[in-house]
Amino acid sequence: MSSTRLLVLGVLYEGPRHGYEINQLVTAGSLEQWTDVKAGSVYHALAKLESEGLAETHAEERTGDRLRRIYGITPEGRHALRDLLRKALSAPPHSTTSGFALALRWHTLLDPGEARELVEASSLALESRRAEIAAGRRAKEGLSPLADVLFDNAEAHLAADAKLLADIRRLLAR
């Protein structure tokens, strides 16, 4: 399932928008931290959705030298959005698959010191991510009970990953 399709159709369901406006929502909401949606993918998604008949150009407006297309969702797009929602809400919220887990299988191909350094770098990146999540929670405090449970879940996953990395560091130190 494409999170970008879900996002773009969901935003268009709320009302007609142009690509720049949707990109601003992605950036302002820090969606790249929570989803696989990248701001640059919005324009491609809009063009694809329009070619599939799920979105359509409602109007064009001139802003300086630029001509912006304002898109809206079609009835077929509303149907596709509901299908995407059903698929997304019926799947587990997080995956246990990871390139890290696969790479761990062959960590002995690296120098032991290098493997330990890389796992330590992973730990530092994880701690940085935990700080970002904490800052995001503070910035969005009181937003909604749903946001609170999503932050709780993210923090629990990161705590479990921190424990995993501590266990791996301990085992690699042997």
Image: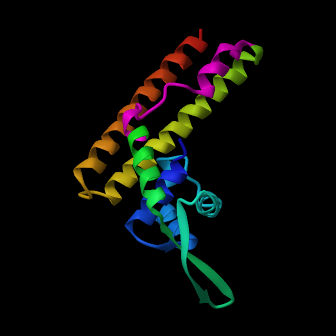
User: Is residue 94 found inside the magenta-colored segment of the image?
Assistant: yes
In this orientation, which residue lies closer to the viewer: 112 or 95?
A: 95
Give above or below for 69 relative to 171.
below
Q: Residue at x 64, y 63 (%)?
A: 47
Give above or below for 149 relative to 69.
above
The image shows residue 11 at horizontal and vertical percentages of 44, 63
Residue that lies at the very extreme toward the bottom in this rendered image: 64
Applied colour scheme: rainbow
Tell me the magenta residue range: 88-108
In this orientation, which residue lies closer to the viewer: 83 or 97?
A: 83
In this orientation, which residue lies closer to the viewer: 108 or 83?
A: 83
Q: Residue at x 44, y 42 (%)?
A: 130
- Residue 145 located left or right of residue 157: left
- Residue 106 located left or right of residue 134: right
Count of numbered labels shown in the rendering? 0
Instruction: Locate residue 159: give its quadrant.
Output: top left
Q: Residue at x 49, y 43 (%)?
A: 129
User: Is residue 154 found inside the magenta-colored segment of the image?
Assistant: no
The image shows residue 99 at horizontal and vertical percentages of 63, 27
In this orientation, which residue lies closer to the viewer: 95 or 51?
A: 51
The image shows residue 135 at horizontal and vertical percentages of 39, 53
The quadrant of the picture occupied by the C terminus is top right
Give above or below for 92 relative to 53.
above
Q: Is residue 38 visible?
A: yes
Q: Residue at x 55, y 11 (%)?
A: 171
Q: Is residue 29 visible?
A: no
The image shows residue 61 at horizontal and vertical percentages of 57, 86
